[in-house]
Amino acid sequence: MIHLFPKSSSFLNVILLLCVILLSEQSQGETRKRVVFLGDSVTAGYGLKKEEAYPALVQAMAAKDGYNILAINAGLSGDTTSGGLRRIRVLAKKPIHILIIALGGNDGLRGLPPTSSEKNIKAIVDIVQKQSPETKIMIAGMQMPENMGEEYREAFQKIFPTTAKDKKVHLLPFLLEGVAADKSLNLPDLIHPNAQGQKIMAKHVYQALAPLLK
């Protein structure tokens, strides 16, 4: 579900992303609840404007309902759960009121062991809960296409509910619910949601997020 970049550019991508996040926060102040979306190219809004990606749309929806949040789009194209584990150590240095973990798609497409992905996601949760026990965490589930094989698909899909249950955090069963594999809602690669697909994702995510904002 996710755009892959050459490994040689990954370090520079991380540095640039973190710089953008810090500058954005400085310009908008620290009065809002910080909702961090830790994801990959789907979260980053690959092929779209930043304001068309679902984190920005979720922020707008929250504002209409009177919730003053700052959506931090920590989506990085090509990122895996191991990459997210490295990045969360930096992101967690500033307060996180709500963390949405939307990683795993690239792990699956690369055929990485589901047990490894599960371990990484649990480690991300552990880091945040240790540093900030009051942070609310939601894990967004991912699914693999049929060509990955039924056995792998089932093992991969179990990662997310299992982790959410073990760590006692919230679960969004499938991030791309109603969007995945729909030609009208994705870019020509049939992997990345287009602007309309991102809108549907935003409604889906906000429906699960809204109770955590109360």
Image (spheres, rainbow, N blue to C red):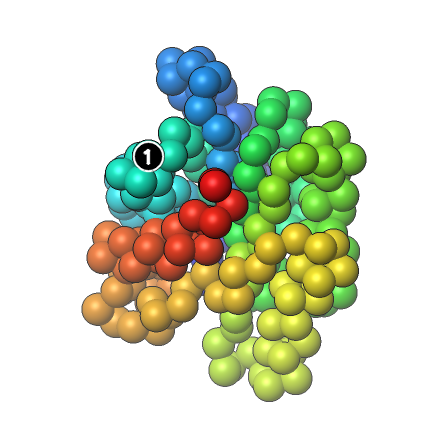
Residue 165 in view in this figure: yes
Give the vertical position of 122 relative to 110 (above or below). Answer: above
Q: Secondary structure at mark 1?
A: loop
| Residue occupying the point 44% across, 24% down | 32
**Nearest to the observer: residue 11 or residue 62:** 62
Q: Hey, what amino acid is under mark 1?
A: Gly
State the image coordinates of residue 122 (x, y, percent, origin top left): 73, 52
User: In front here: 17 or 180?
Assistant: 180
Q: Judge by depth and name the residue closer to the eye, 84 or 96.
A: 96
Please determine whether, in this image, residue 112 is positioned above or below residue 84.
Answer: below
Up/down of 132 relative to 23, above or below: below
Q: Quadrant of residue 197?
A: bottom left
Query: Residue 27's spot in the image, x, y percent?
Result: 38, 14
Image quarter of the N terminus: bottom left
**Residue lying farthest front?**
214
**Residue 214's x, y, as percent?**
48, 41
Q: Residue at point 66% right, 72% down?
A: 158
Residue shown at the point (66%, 84%) measured from the top left: 151
**Is the residue 86 above or below the residue 163 in the image?**
above
What residue is disc 1 on?
66
